[in-house]
Image (cartoon, helix red, strand yellow):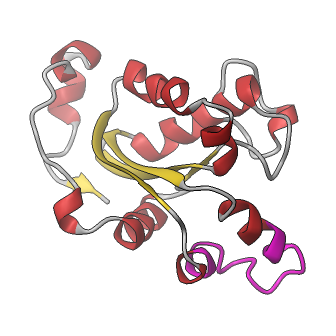
Amino acid sequence: MHIEQTLVILKPDCLQRNLVGKVIERFEQKGFKLIGIKMMELSDVILEEHYSHVKDKPFFPKIKSFMQSSPCVVLAWQGIAAVRVVRQLCGITKARDANPGTIRGDFALSQQYNIIHASDSVETAKTEIKRLFKDAELFSYQKIDFDFTHADDERALADDEITA
């Protein structure tokens, strides 16, 4: 098991629908450690880098327009298997087919207006966190509930090295 860092973007629909607190609460309740948070407008450069895999597709201008329709809230989370578990909490991208109990399953119906983005791998998380956070905006601190969200043997197996 590894302690990982991952990036979450709360998209404009999350902000406009007043769901920011409810979504953040899901990650806090699960036991993740919040190490970075800020509200920001995503520039053309950031969006072209973030969506580089689709920036040449005909639908990219709609994605860019949506992502720039209001500020986004970006968060960096840390925890054991954070990338995989955060994505499970989010639910599948096509929100209308996402399972109830997931963020998308509970709060969204659209594939594009789906409330949230989460890094899809440890490598992607590293890149995305560097893209959206300066080193000084990420915090290292003792989270006192770690001993109550992970059994002794799980804490012992978690690497001291943080992945991301």
Q: Is residue 150 above or below residue 59?
A: above
**Residue 96, quarter of picture:** top right
Residue 57 forms part of the magenta stretch: yes
Q: Which residues are magenta?
A: 47-62
**Residue at horizontal 57 percent and vertical 41 percent from the top:** 87
Say if 49 sits above or below 35 in the image.
below
Residue 18 in the image: x percent, y percent? 61, 30
Please state if 2 lies on the left or on the right of 128 as rendered. Answer: left
Magenta stretch encompasses residue 102: no
> In which quadrant is the N terminus drawn?
top left
Q: Nearer the viewer, residue 62 or 32?
A: 62
Between 58 and 122, the one lying in front of the other is: 58
In the foreground, 38 or 144: 38
Which residue appears at 73% of the width and 82% of the height? 55
**Rendering quarter of residue 32:** top left
Q: At 68% from the left edge and 33% from the top edge, which residue is drawn?
A: 17
85 displayed left or right of 96:
left
In percent of width and height, residue 139 lies at: 17, 49
Name the residue at the left extreme: 142
Numbered label tally? 0
